Image (cartoon, rainbow, N blue to C red):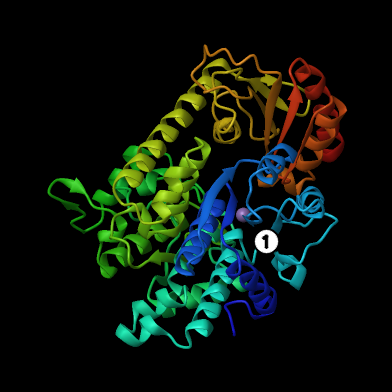
Amino acid sequence: MTGPVPELDERALACARHLRDCDRVLLASHIDADGLTSAAIAAQALERAGIPFEAVFEKQLDETAIADIAVTDYDTVLFTDFGSGQLDIISEHEDDGAFTPVIADHHQPADRDTEYHLNPLLFGIDGASELSGAGASYVLARALAELTAETDGSDPIAAADGGTATARADNRDLAALAVVGAVGDMQASGGELHGANEGIVGEGVDAGVVETGTDLALYGKQTRPLPKLLEYATDVRIPGISNDQRGALSFLDGLDLDLKSGGEWRCWAELTREEQQTVASALVKRAVERGVPASKIDQLVGTSYVLSEEPVGTELRDASEFSTLLNATARYERADVGLGVCLGDREGALERARKLLRNHRRNLSEGIDLVTEEGVTHEAHVQWFHAEDRIRETIVGIVAGMAMGNDGVSRSKPILAFAEKGGDGNGGTETDAEEIKVSGRGTHGLVRKGLDLSVVMGEASRAVGGDGGGHDVAAGATVPKGSEAEFVERADEIVGDQLS
Ligand SMILES: [Mn+2]
């Protein structure tokens, strides 16, 4: 077999052989866009291979979650998009004979290994930028199909009607979900996917489920009316258009194009190629005139990943809009809805997912209003606010990042945002939280000056009896209630050292 990632072939086949011989499997996956697409890929591969399974989702695969999995009477557990980092705990249960783990993950492995462990990092492939959890699951899915074909002695469905059916028979149709997972895990850097991910994109293109092209790199090409597409695009700030409703409208009005249909603004995806080119060149021209640096202007264009079998004008057609929709279901712990959308439920699940995304956007804007109205407290090197139970802990970090730059919220200091764990974000709920979630957000400019929030959040939280970590520009921690002031003091010191 030459799978999409040849380095992983042998291990993937070993994992697939073990799964094939199981009477049934428990599928456990992470709740985020990559975890949901991982589960959807694994679920379809298991189903097509005739292996019964049940799926469970966890926000965090901690000791308790693994113990809960161990007491089920499944002999084999397939972990997707997590499991590697928890191998120390998982292996203890394996040693006790609780279950055999099969792991398709891309995170840094703990200091133990196991036989059926499929992770790009074990084979010299970067798990942060070249292969996602969904990608690892896809490699496994391709291996499962390979075994099925061997057993049947042929490609039965392919023989009957070729084309798409071939893609289904060898699971290459699942490449579309793997691309959504990789994009959801922010693996498209510099506007495109790289390395092992490129191999998967290639299989998706061959299978007719993915189309790539050079296109405007703005979010919302399928679903946002043109003025909103331009107004909300703030990764590359174009003065007079970004964050400027009237500016965006007058820019479009100034083009010699008919961009409305039935009185409504059209979406980017509905424009002809010529119309798109006219808008894009006018946008670039405007950016140049307004002094946007060339390196920034380059970022206006990137590779688009289109799911060609999905209808034009829906979130599902664009990998980045699809992954945003999935993240919205994940943030509100509706993995069932996200999985349903991935598995093709285009009515109930899709409508519920859209509603979750609308609510999510409303929660974000209400959260930003709250922070802007109440303001933040400025220390020497950091600024902070405490949302208590008025902003949901799962979104307080995004709110903090988006509020930076608003009145009174500086972009020259990192921001720390506290929220009670377990709150619903509506206030007034009796959460009796013992634990407080802290999210830290910086800017890339601060990171270039030495800021590393993963260190700040990790050290400051451990100093007060909590724990945390993450990335240089964004990190999180959990601390005991009542330790917030001490946490801020420690964080302020560490940031001061980093930026000095
Ligand atoms: Mn992932």
Q: Is residue 120 left or right of residue 497?
A: left
Question: Could you tell me residue 178's position as x and y percent?
Answer: 51, 64
Q: Is residue 58 left or right of residue 473?
A: left
Which quadrant would the N terminus be assigned to in this image?
bottom right
Q: Which of 461 and 280 is in front in this view?
A: 461
Q: How many labels does the image show?
A: 1
For the point 66% across and 55% down, the residue is 75
Question: Could you tell me residue 323's position as x and y percent?
Answer: 47, 52
Q: Mark 1 points at which residue?
A: 102
Q: In this view, does 153 lie to the left or right of 131?
A: left
Is residue 6 shown above or below 498? below
Q: Does the residue labelled 1 lie within 8 Å of ligand 1?
A: no
For the point 59% across and 61% down, the residue is 189
The type of residue carrying mark 1 is: Val
Hey, which quadrant is residue 195 in on the image?
bottom right
- Which quadrant of the render holds ligand 1? bottom right
Question: Could you tell me residue 344's position as x and y percent?
Answer: 36, 56
